[in-house]
């Protein structure tokens, strides 16, 4: 086993222990929570090692990094999630490899995703990114739509050809009433998910929590956690 593989295996084992312990504390089964490893800034060689170690869900937030990496790893049994703010001019590329786009936050993006998914003859799962630091229908500091805009966007996605409404996603906000209150933020997301599922029962995916706060996300009921640093190490500078 290479040094890097041993390092990643050890890190994965620690994260697995954390998720398992969080599930036990919350009275949940371990299989209720899916680990998504965020591989941004790390090379395709790391993605290949992660696949060998059993990881099946990986995420990226910049298309210019993700597209070549996904192409290089196209032989692997991976589901790619796009989790960054997505510009419409990158949609065609992203639809080429991403099975799930977790950052849907405006109607124009829904239209662009549907158009390219139809062109590619490929169904794309979509999560509405919720901004808990935004005004009722405004945009969040790190993307996402305010609480008042969720229902309309969810309906748009559900009706759009080749798009599948999978659920909701959030990033713990740095400002506003939920700043520093990750548990409360994730519990609010779960309440919003319950409301969405009344109209769209299959939209039961809740993506929340990262390396620093995955326990709070699991306690709140998240179905997916997005972990990067705890698995891959501190990210190299992009400078």
Image (cartoon, rainbow, N blue to C red):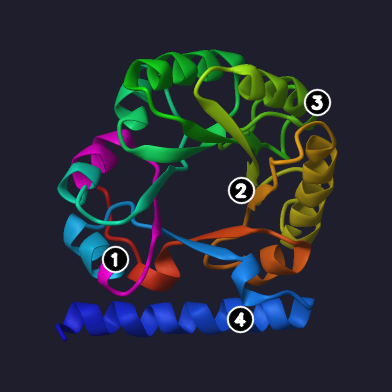
Residue visible at 53% across and 17% down in the picture: 161
From the image, state whether disc 4 or disc 3 is nearer to you: 4
From the image, state whether disc 3 or disc 1 is nearer to you: 1
Residue visible at 84% across and 47% down in the picture: 191
Disc 4 marks which residue? 20
Which sits earlier in the primary sequence, circle 2 or circle 4?
Answer: 4
> Where residue 171 is drawn, which disc sits there?
2
- Give the extent of the magenta segment: 51-69
> Where residue 148 is drawn, which disc sits there?
3
Dot 4, how many residues are within 10 Å of its Cα: few (below 14), some (14-19), or many (20+)? Answer: some
Which sits earlier in the primary sequence, circle 4 or circle 3?
Answer: 4
From the image, state whether disc 2 or disc 1 is nearer to you: 1
Residue 208, picture quadrant: bottom right
For the residues bearing labels 2 and 1, Cβ distance under 8 angstroms = no
Total marks shown come to 4
Which sits earlier in the primary sequence, circle 2 or circle 1?
Answer: 1
Measure how far apart labels 1 and 4 are at the Cα level.
Answer: 20 Å
Q: Quadrant of the N terminus?
A: bottom left
Of helix, strand and loop, which one carries label 1? helix
What is the x, y in percent for residue 200?
A: 75, 34
Look at the picture and state if 48 lies above or below 7.
Answer: above
What is the x, y in percent for residue 80?
A: 38, 47
């Amino acid at each position: 086993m290479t040094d890097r593989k041993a390092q990643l295996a050890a890190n994965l084992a620690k994260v697995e222990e954390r998720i398992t312990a969080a599930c036990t504390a919350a009275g949940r089964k371990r299989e209720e929570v899916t680990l998504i490893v965020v591989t941004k800034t790390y090379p395709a060689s790391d993605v290949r090692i992660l696949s060998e170690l059993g990881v099946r869900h990986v995420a990226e937030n910049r298309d210019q990094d993700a597209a070549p990496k996904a192409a290089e790893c196209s032989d692997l049994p991976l589901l790619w999630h796009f989790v960054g703010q997505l510009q419409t001019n990158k949609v065609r590329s992203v639809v080429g490899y991403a099975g799930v786009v977790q950052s849907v936050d405006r109607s124009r993006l829904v239209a662009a995703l549907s158009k390219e998914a139809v062109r590619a003859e490929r169904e794309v799962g979509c999560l509405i990114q919720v901004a808990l630091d935004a005004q009722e229908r405004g945009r969040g500091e790190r993307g996402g739509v305010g609480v008042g805009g969720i229902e309309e966007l969810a309906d748009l996605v559900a009706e759009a050809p080749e798009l599948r409404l999978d659920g909701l996603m959030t990033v713990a906000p740095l400002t506003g009433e939920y700043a520093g209150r990750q548990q409360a933020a994730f519990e609010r997301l779960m309440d919003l998910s319950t409301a969405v599922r009344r109209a769209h029962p299959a939209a039961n995916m809740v993506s929340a929590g990262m390396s620093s706060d995955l326990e709070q996300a699991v306690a709140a009921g998240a179905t997916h956690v997005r972990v990067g640093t705890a698995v891959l190490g501190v990210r190299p500078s992009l400078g």
